[in-house]
Image (cartoon, rainbow, N blue to C red):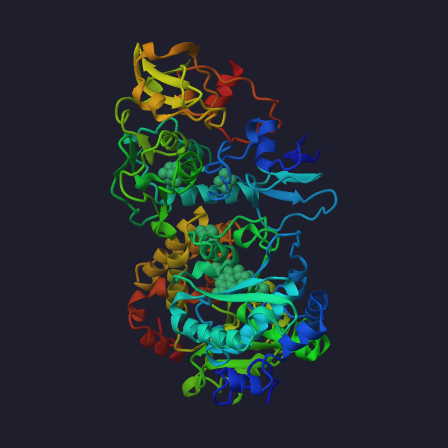
Amino acid sequence: MPKVTIDGHSIEVPDGTTILEAARKIGGKIVPPAMCYYSTLKTSGGYCRTCIVKVSKGSERDPRPMPKPVASCRTTVMDGMEVENITSPDLMEARAGVVEFLLINHPLDCPICDQAGECHLQDLSYEHGLSKSRYEFERRTFEKIDIGEKIKLHMTRCILCYRCVKVADQLCDGRVHGVINRGDVSEISTYIKNVVDNDFSGNMIDVCPVGALTDRTFRFKSRVWNVNPVDAHRDCKKCAGKVMLWQKGPEVFRVTGRKDTYGEVIDWICNECRFDKKQTSDWVIEGPSNIERTSVISQNHYTLPEPAHKPLLNDVKIVPDHYQIDNKK
Amino acid sequence: MGKKILLKNDHIPGIQSYDVYRQHGGYASVEKALKTMTPEVIVEEVKKSGLRGRGGAGFPTGLKWSFLAKPEGVARYLVCNADESEPGTFKDRYLMERIPHLLIEGMIASSFALGAKTSYIYIRGEYFYVARILEQAIEEAYAKGWLGKNILGSGFDFDLHVHVGAGAYICGEETALLESLEGKRGNPRIKPPFPAIAGLYACPTIVNNVETIAAVVPIINDGGDAYAQIGIGKSTGTKLISASGHINKPGVYEIEMGITVEDFIYSDEYCGGIKGGRKLKAVVAGGSSVPILPAELILKTAAGEPRLMSYESLADGGFATGTMLGSGGFIVMDESTSIVKNLWNFSRFYHHESCGQCSPCREGTGWMEKILHRILEGHGKMSDVDLLWDIQGKIEGKTICPLGDAAAWPVASAIRHFRKEFEDYVQKPSSIKDVKHYYRLHEAGTAS
Ligand SMILES: Cc1cc2nc3c(=O)[nH]c(=O)nc-3n(C[C@H](O)[C@H](O)[C@H](O)COP(=O)(O)O)c2cc1C
Ligand code: SF4
Ligand code: SF4
Ligand code: FES
């Protein structure tokens, strides 16, 4: 098994493991942020470039460093590889550049966006972004459209991570959803407006890292940190039926898939579970969900578990302070 | 007269047609290859020739060919990159328009060497009329038995198709080209795998430029060693240069690698000097993506050596004082040229052509264009120049495909060598409203 060292932490991983997955096995602060990679979607990753890392030693056999930063989500480890992530100031600056690029045309309408509190872009800019934008031009905007009965597309917020396109390709039948135009006027679009009508299309909402795809049955009903996530399941013929119910009192505001530490869905759920089962009586309740994210959404809920290792680099401020506060509890 | 191999019969009337082409030795390389050579021997000859890819990167062609995977029972493809959309580059068009059979001959011989039974010429959408010329030539070649089943009784079956793109510069990037050829959106693929392992329809594929494939013909005819004799050092053979800008004789020239840049610009055989006898200001030597160099650095290297038309000499000094041969799009600018305006034009192009897959290129190209436009319009700030420098640095090397670099390098080099001009645009907007006027004042030393 190849051995890789990331920011001084070594780990042995199976052949074919990516640098990002190896870093996730180590855990903690050295895990590169990922805006487009999604562990359960094939061929995802490589687009956003937030996960870039510096490979300071290629492998035992060929120790030369790689000439450019590489996307850790699409680069497989080699035996003896050495990777610098948060220990390289150059790399951190390059990543801050990527974050800036993602933000220059983003509307930053968090106060009215349903995704706020569970938005990966919000977390990312909090951790890596500048407090003031250097972009002084008009930001690009698009009209909001409905794609299918239950999903709202607000393209203005999209970061073109292609995750929803992969959901459409891998979970839904036919080619119904993709990208049109190119460059900075690229647009997520459907073959024919409203055509997205498939039992699994709702998963696009879960994979969208920002508020570009939102649940029309939940829009503007509540801030996410004001509803409580509860694990629940039901016997479903179409999917695993394992979900999170987001409740205020007995009322179910929305249903989503269950997500891992990195906010990525573990089991896809069908649209019936997601949109049509909004009574607690539809579900067998398992208990409060454990939200393991360094995000606003975890505030007021449950504490984070201890990281897998003691971070060596306490001096590097890379996550918001509440992460550290929670850890001390 | 300089050595010509690709364009040696260019002057012959009717060379476009099969009969005239054949009378002048056309298709000899296919005869020689199929009757007397094995694929391995041809690859060996190409290696010996030292031929390097003419599409821009200059990667050794023989080496690239030897990377081609050859799993049992899996088709292999050769794809000719005729997407030629780099501003300043028009040599492939010239070659295909004038001597279409040379490309077809090269495709047959190269495909035989690579074991490809079907190959494609992917041609830029705007070259639709050239596509017709090629299609007609292919028809002739089929009729004469150079294409189709059992060519020359050798048992080699080979089909060649022309595929017309839809007008996107990015489809010249080899993996975007393959996506487009497969009927998909032309987005560059994330590598690895490289095309030589998994290319067209996930089969092993070689992508080569038009000129590269054409050069295989003389390499087979005269041998790799003879080809390697031409040129200088590791820049073997001849190169087609598309010369444009403020010169007396714009056009496509075949040069032997190693002639001096000065000779190329000023001799009557090539560009014939600067129009109106004006002074040379700057040159973009290899298509819009390569760094621009001011007159003193394009004519001589930083060490004071004469700069030569070769991969190595043009790159001498790295990006600090050198540039690249690139695709051979040689753009000459005289003293009346506004570097800022020219850069804005290039930046507008890259902004328009970014596929939009990766964040730095999608967002950064537009940002740079807007800042440059603001400077050009006289609304720039002094901090804009540093901002541009910072943005280009944050794009370069952080993208999926080299279009990001191609957008960054012109900005970096223009600021590196012509910073003062950007600052003048910012500080004296009134004097630059009329660009020509500004330069006249500037020359006389009265601009203030
Ligand atoms: C944005 C972009 C555009 C390109 N356009 C062309 C082109 O029009 N023609 C070409 O031959 N190569 C082009 N290339 C280079 C190709 O990717 C590839 O390297 C080349 O076709 C390989 O052929 P060669 O080895 O014969 O040069 C382009 C590369 C990039 C990144
Ligand atoms: S809509 Fe969301 S999931 Fe789809 S590409 Fe945009 S940001 Fe990604
Ligand atoms: S660098 Fe630009 S053109 Fe190339 S893949 Fe990225 S966005 Fe597309
Ligand atoms: S997560 Fe790796 S490039 Fe987006």
- Vertical placement of B237 versus B371: above or below? below
Image quadrant containing the N terminus of chain B: bottom right
> Quadrant of the rendered structure where residue A313 is?
top right
Count the marks. Answer: 0
Quarter of the rendered structure image containing ligand 2: top left
Q: Please determine whether, in this image, residue A172 is positioned above or below residue B223.
A: above
Q: Looking at the image, can residue A229 be seen?
A: yes
**In the image, residue B172 above or below residue A97:** below
Q: Position of residue B361 (x, y in %)?
A: 44, 51
At a point 32% along the width and 59% down the height, the residue shown is B374
* Residue at screen point 48% across, 58% down: B177
Residue drawn at the location 42% of the way across and 62% of the way down:
B165
In terms of image quadrants, where is residue A130? top left
Q: Nearer the viewer, residue B75 or B433?
A: B75
- In the image, taking residue B403 as reference, residue A83 lies left or right, namely right
Camera-side residue: B153 or A129? Answer: B153
Regarding residue B290, the answer to whether it shows in the image is: no
What quarter of the picture does the C terminus of chain B occupy? Answer: bottom left
Instruction: Give the percent coordinates (x, y) of residue A114.
Output: 31, 28
Residue drawn at point x = 66 percent, y = 74 percent: B236
Between B410 and A16, the one lying in front of the other is: A16
Above or below A288: residue B78: below
- The percent coordinates of residue A296 (x first, y second) are 40, 24
From the top left corner, tell me how far across and down residue B223 is, in percent: 70, 77
